[in-house]
Image (spheres, grey):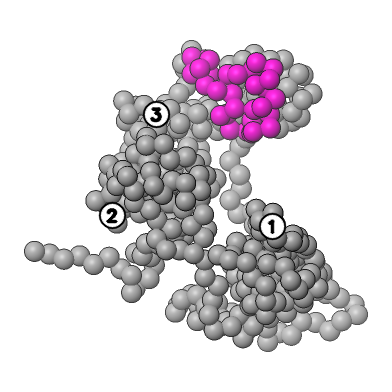
Amino acid sequence: MYGLCDCNNFFVSCERVFRPDLEGRPVVVLSNNDGCVVARSNEAKAIGVGMGQPYFQAKGLLERHGGTVFSSNYTLYGDLSRRVMTTLRSLVEEIEIYSIDEAFFNLEGYDEPLDELGRKIRTTIRRHTGIPVSIGIAPTKTLAKIAAKLAKQYPKLGGCCYMHRAEDIRKVLTKFPLKDVWGIGRRYGKAFDQMQILTAQQFVELEKQWVQGRMGITGVRTWQELRGIPSLPLDDLSASKQQITVSRSFPHEIYDCGELERIVAEFATMCGEKLRRQGSLCRAIHCFVMTNRHRADQPQHVEEAVHRFTTATDSTLSLVKAGRELLRTIYRAGYGYKKAGITLSGFEARGMQQQSLFEAPADPRHGRLMEVMDQVNRLYGQRTLKTAAEGEKPFQMNREHVSRRYTTEWSELLTVKAK
């Protein structure tokens, strides 16, 4: 048996942990630069706020219904996610963190009634973190995903849906939309709609060869999972990322190359920190810039470039230098750039990199400097030590409605007044 722990309206729930006065009221969280709605409370859904809806379109509706708006506060959300996953790991032995608000767990060998265990997990996480979660338990990960959705939809289940009997699974799949099944996706969903294959049960009743011919092995795995045959084991959580990207949209178009250089330097620094955190080195750095594709009245320019290091590196100094040089090759004067990004790839484990026959080894002082830099920034806060290329003022997005970092910043701790 597999379980799925799915945080309910996670970003909204994080805000409500420290604002209990928002319970029962419409609440939304916005994307970067306060552009679109990326999280909604049930009350916001009920009044018609759409997922991904531009904020300027939803603003009036929220104001009429007394709604509250927050800018994305990823520092807060990331820390509360870590607390949820730590609590879950204390209750079950093997978990796979699937996203910031979801984690699968293995229930093989557990003897106690699994629905009671699911409710215990839900209650414990709520008590320890304040975050409400839904638990789905089923023979496969795909069925557990469906069970978790049912746990959210039907309050009578008490936040946990234990879906294990064959007749119950068939009954659920007969009504469950195929396009909403994990692993089907939008493209296949549209194709199956045209073929009038609308429910998960209709998909299950197809021949294996038919599914494989149209969807390949990935489709077959989904087909088997819906039949109760585990085909997606828990992933190895020790595996490192094979690519790291930091990219942002800007609040306004940027025309100045110097300003773009400072932003790219900051992105390269952030990538370097993540790279060292997982103990990797990279052999390539990519830089891209793009104009605002929604502005048909302005000239458009999208371009990227890559630099390959002779010897793999994790030095922020090397990454920033290469990133700025790449930007200079792709920047074009006269264009208003709306987005830029840095990507690192070609990873190797630190200490096992292949040295070049024709170039001197990397300066060993870089490694010691990076260790000190990371230690200081962990202790005293990000950007305490940084490269001169980043400038004095860090890149800022539009965040007019951002909440406090209640759990990670001393100056923003919650103030409690006793009467």
Q: Is residue 191 magenta?
A: yes
Mark 2 or 1: in front is 1
Q: Residue at x 64, y 77 (%)?
A: 259
Residue 122: tell me if it is visible. Answer: no
User: Which residue position is annotated with label 1?
Assistant: 297
Query: On the rendered structure, is 62 left or right of 32?
Result: left
Query: On the rendered structure, is 235 left or right of 381?
Result: right
Q: Which disc, if any, is residue 153?
A: 3
Q: Given the image, on which type of amino acid does mark 1 rest? A: Asp
Measuring from the top left, give residue 120's x and y in whole percent: 33, 38
Q: Residue at x 80, y 82 (%)?
A: 361
Residue range in magenta is 170-199
Q: Residue at x 49, y 64 (%)?
A: 398
User: Which residue position is annotated with label 2?
Assistant: 19
Query: On the rendered structure, is 126 left or right of 226?
Result: left
| Circles 1, 3 touching at the beta carbon (< 8 Å) | no
Mark 1 or 3: in front is 1
